[in-house]
Amino acid sequence: MPKTSKSNRYQALIEGIFFDHYANDAQSFEFARTELVSKSEELGIDLPSNLGDVVYSVRYRTPLPSRILKTQPEGLEWIIEGAGRARYRFRLVSETRIAPRDDLIRISIPDATPEVIRAYALDDEQALLAIVRYNRLIDTFLGLTTYSLQNHLRTTVKDVGQIEIDELYVGIDTEGCHYIIPVQAKGGNDQIGIVQTSQDIAFVEQKFDGLKCRAISAQFMTDGVVALFELAIQDDQVRVAKERHYRLVPADQINSKAIRNYTPS
């Protein structure tokens, strides 16, 4: 078999598994992680040691294969969500694209990121999480006092299976109310995932019953601008509740006139 790129191999696997189960008018169907192994043997494709990377790739990095996209009814799209331990589910949902708007102002924030962190960050996601943490952007965005509890938290959610939360914060407001804040970070070409948001919210509801969830997504834009979104589930869809764009600059480049313009009237 000719040597192909990793993304092409992953898409071939997902396409094969999809059409093993798909039938006309199907709204959802499940498959087991072990099917990645059997399908790779059938197609002569080398699998990565981390089988989850196959599903992660088509969730966040690359579009689904064109043959799968052609089966989508107008206004709907296929997502792949967890369906329990080592199981996944293809499901049709309303089409959703969460991406930074082009028409929002960019709020300048004095950059508090240590240079050594910028020098040794290993990837975009790690760098973004560090920048958000050191500049207390979650505090600024939500108007809360927040504390990073854990990053890259691997856990399980009932009826979903294993998930990973990029970073988990706890927050306190002026009345002393507590919040749990899962954050997903996306750099490079990765897309903000509605599946990850749904899983993060489900985790909070299961593990922190009674506390309010404020689900956040962070996305690198051009020129080092950080877009922050607060996401919520409404009518079984992930929707944007709030969006802000922050530009990190040296303190001596802060525009005093701009600061006055940011001040609420």
Image (spheres, rainbow, N blue to C red):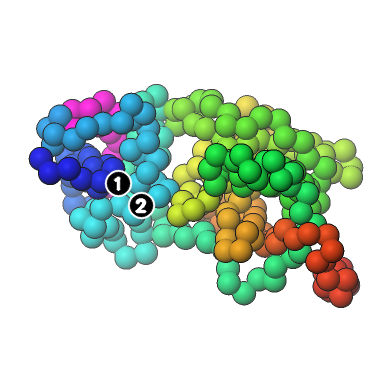
Q: Mark 1 points at which residue?
A: 7
- Front-lying residue, 228 or 89: 228
Of marks 2 and 1, the one in the foreground: 1
- Residue 264: image quadrant is bottom right
> Vertically, is 192 above or below 175?
below
Q: Residue shown at 83%/71% (left/top)?
A: 255
> Vertically, is 217 above or below 120?
below
Amino acid carrying label 2: it is: Thr
- Front-lying residue, 21 or 246: 246
**Dot 1: few (<14), some (14–19), or many (≥20) neighbours within 10 Å?**
some
Can I make out residue 166 in this image? yes
Q: Residue shown at 65%/45% (left/top)?
A: 118
Q: Residue shown at 84%/64% (left/top)?
A: 252
On whether residue 28 falls in the magenta region, the answer is yes
Q: Residue shown at 76%/64% (left/top)?
A: 108
Q: In this view, does 93 lie to the left or right of 65?
A: right
- What is the number of the mark on residue 210? none
Amino acid carrying label 1: it is: Ser
> Vertically, is 94 above or below 175?
below
Magenta region = 26-40
Q: Mark 2 points at which residue?
A: 62
Quadrant of the image containing the N terminus = top left
- Label 2 with label 1: CB-CB less than 8 Å: yes
Please state the horizontal and vertical placement of residue 192, each as a whole percent of the image. Answer: 51, 52
